[in-house]
Image (spheres, rainbow, N blue to C red):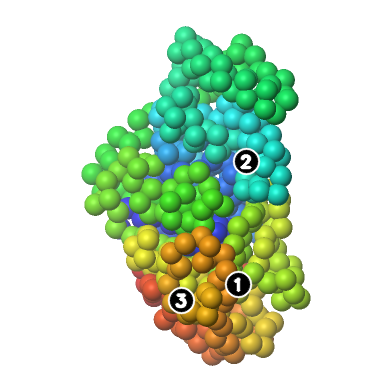
Amino acid sequence: MPAIVVLGAQWGDEGKGKATDLLATTDPIDFVVRTSGGHNAGHTIVVNGEKYATHLLPSGILTPGATSVIANGVVVSPEALFRELDGLLERGVEVADLKVSANAHVIAPYHTVIDKVTERFLGKNQIGTTGRGIGPTYADKINRTGIRIADLFDEGILTEKVEAALDVKNQLLAKVYNRRAMEVDEVVEELLSYAERLRPMVCDTSLLLNQALDAGKTVLFEGAQATMLDVDHGTYPFVTSSSPIAGGVCTGAGVGPTRIDRIIGVIKAYTTRVGSGPFPTELFDADGEALQRIGGEIGVSTGRTRRCGWYDAVIARYSARVNGLTEFFLTKLDVLDSWEKIPVCVAYEVDGQRHDEMPMTQTEFHHAKPVYEYLDGWQEDITGCRRFSDLPANAQAYVRRLEELSGAPFWAVGVGPGREQTVVVHDG
């Protein structure tokens, strides 16, 4: 199918890179596209026993013959982009062709400073941002005071935009946060230093992608963050500053919704989240510690330990609905190998009332208590399984029950971190 979306169906860190990488190596993928977020995202890919982490770059950057695209909906730190590219090159990785949208917004040095000082200023009311300038850059974009990649090639326009931005931001830094004002010339000089290396990568990516689809090329749109972090449909205000749901792919890439053929939601066999905010199935006991330890639940981009809990079918159904998922990709089933009984959240209880769907308000969700169904574990190593029929009967039953509860069919199941450690349930 020519246009495929892969996105996170929980709070992120579900293994989207593994799903993207699997698609790119089993089908001829011509373009792999990032449509939102910045270098606050993180994908881990294991190829031939080697672990690679991508942050701003699409994970398709590791796929020979594919063109990687950073589209207009992404906010770009040129410094982070070049650091990531250089890190791959130093490891001897053959980096795929990379294109960057001229309309993508630039994370300037003042965005990062403001992100960090604002989060510290909030104290106990912190959102849990990564401090990398993502939110302030999106705020400037919406306020129409942002800097686009194309502006780096016009010193006059760039200087005007930085002057206008710092006229207000320096007042904030000095008078509210008691920080040193930033110099216009220093910011402009740093941003201009990236222009020549960027120039050959920059193009009209919307035109590029639509022409590719017209020509019958296969385009894979790769999500960053996840559904429950969407600024409209996530657990607001504990969300990211962009729209990582399927609808955001269209605005973030400049393609129409009628071009999309397949939407895959990546979801863990349990649940994790990083940062602040409500999390109904979160565990504070030995089971939570075991999920964190066995699953290696540490953020790829942040280094923060992930909060862990049981699978939440309410969240899965919600993700299936707001994204229009055609299927799920279930990851990390092997992490559950040692449990005798595995709880699955099938509904919430809020003030004595059962909710089979997401509660309407933040207050209700904050007070939601999970209603569990207990499934039998399999208590054996499944990392060597390569067909669904190879899985123990209880593991198959677990997957089938999650599928019944989650609102969309399961395409495949991850049974380990390696590219080859995947079991197909239904052909996509």
Name the N-terminal-most of marks 1 and 3. 1
Q: Which mark is residue 281?
A: 1
Name the N-terminal-most of marks 1 and 2. 2
Residue at the image position 49 percent from the left and 40 percent from the top: 96
Q: CA distance from mark 1 to mark 3?
A: 14 Å
Q: Image quadrant of residue 372? A: bottom right
Q: How many marks?
A: 3
Left or right placement of residue 248 versus residue 176 in this view:
left
- The C terminus is located in which quarter? bottom left
- Identify residue for label 2: 88
- Identify residue for label 3: 355
Viewer-proximal residue, 404 or 415?
404
Residue at the image position 59 percent from the left and 49 percent from the top: 42
Residue 72 lies, in percent from the top left, at 41, 36
The local crowd at label 3, few if under 14, some if 14 to 19, many if 20 or more residues have their Cα within 10 Å, is some
The relative height of residue 375 versus residue 33 in the rendered view (above or below) is below
